[in-house]
Amino acid sequence: MITAAVIGAGAWGTSIANLLGVKGHRVRIWAREPQVVETINTTAENSLFFPGFPLSPNVSATTQLAEALGGADLVVNVVPTQFIRSTWKDLEKGSLPRGAIYVNASKGIEQGSLSLISRIFEEIFPHVFHEKLVTLSGPSFAEEVALGHPTSVTAASHDSDLALTVAEWFHLPYFRVYTSDDPVGVQLGGALKNVMAIAAGAVDGLGLGLNTRAALITRGLSEIARLGLALGARQETFIGLSGMGDLILTCTGSLSRNRTVGFKLGSGVPIDQILRGSNTVAEGVATAKSAMMLARKHEVDMPITRAVYGGIYEGKSASEALTSILARDLKHDGI
C-alpha cells in the first residue's frame, strides 16, 4: 500500500480520501479550516463539507500543506480551480515529494490565464514534476462514491504507464478507472460539462420539459467537442466517460451543484443570491467566463456557453438567454 496526500477537503476531496483509505492506503487530507481537521481527526467525519459519511480509519487530516505532502507516493489535488495558485504558491518547492505521482481531480478552466489545470501545475511546479501529472475525471458524485455505488472514471496522461499506475491505486470493486492518453480532452470534458449543467438546470427551472433538456445536452456535447478539437483534443474522447458520461450525470442528477445553480436561475433567483446561499463551489460559474473567452480567442461557436455567460455575467434572464439560442440561423446537426 502507499501513502497518499489529498489536498482539498470539500465533499469530493473527502470522498476521494475515504476511497483511498478504504483501499488500504495511508491518507493525509489537507484542509484550510481547523474545524474540518478537528472533526476528521476526532470523529472520523467532515461535518462541515461532507456530513453523514464516516471515514476510513486510514484517513487523518492536517492544516499544514507540507505535513500532508511529507513522504507521499500519491498527491491528489482537489482544490477548486480558481484557488489552486493561491493554495500552492507559498509552498517551499523542496516540500514536494520527488517520487510521487500528482493527480488532479478538480475540474475547471482558470480565469484570466484561460489555463487548463495541468498548465497551472506546469507553471507553478518545477520542470522535474511535469511528467508526473495525471488527470482523474468522469461521472462521479462524491456522495455516491462514498456509498459504494458502482462508478467509472478516467485517468489521463501522455504516459500510459503512469495512468495505469493511478488506475491500479484507485481501483476498487465499485470504483473502476479507465485510462486515456488525451489529458486535454479529458480536462475540457470535465470543465465544460459544468457550464452545460447550468444551462440544463435553467431549462428545468423554466419548466420546458425533457425534449428541451435532451436537445440541450446533445448540442452541448457538440460545443464541448468543437472547443476541444480547436485546443488539440481528440473527438473520440468526448463520447467517453469524461465527456458524454460526465455531461449526462451533471445535467440530469439531483446532486449536481451546477445544475442546481441553473435551476435556481431558471426559477428567477438572482445569481448573487444563489452564490451567497452556498458554502460549496459550483465550478461552472467561473468556467462559463473562461470558456467564453476561449471560444472567442479560438473563434469557436458556443451558443449555449454564450447564453450561460449572459445569464451569469450580463444580467440576462434565463428565458432571454434561451431565446438567443433559438433565434440562431438553422445549422447542420453535428460538430
Image (cartoon, grey):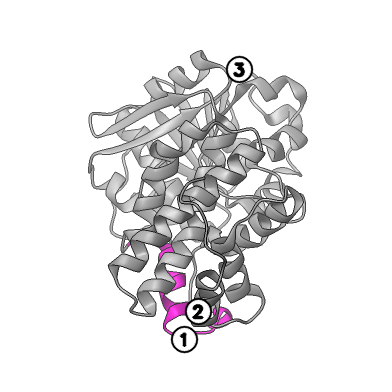
Residue 257 lies within the magenta run:
yes
State the SS at label 1: loop
State the SS at label 3: loop
Q: Nearer the viewer, mark 2 or mark 3?
A: 2
Any mark on residue 268, and which?
Answer: 1
Residue 306 shown left or right of residue 105 in the figure? right
Query: Mark 2 = which residue?
Result: 318
Instruction: Give how far across and how far down residue 18 sits, in percent.
Output: 35, 41
State the SS at label 2: helix
- Inter-mark Cα distance, 2 to 3: 49 Å
Q: Is residue 248 above or below residue 171?
A: below
Residue under the image location 46 percent in, 32 percent down = 236
Instruction: Give how far across and how far down residue 147 sits, in percent.
Output: 24, 47
Any mark on residue 99, and which?
Answer: 3
Name the dominant secondary structure of the magenta segment.
helix
Q: Is residue 140 above or below residue 128?
A: below
Quarter of the rendering containing residue 124: top right
Q: Is residue 134 above or below residue 43?
A: above
- Category of crowding for the residue at label 2, using alpha-carbon neighbours closer than 10 angstroms: few (below 14), some (14–19), many (at least 20): many
- Inter-mark Cα distance, 1 to 3: 51 Å
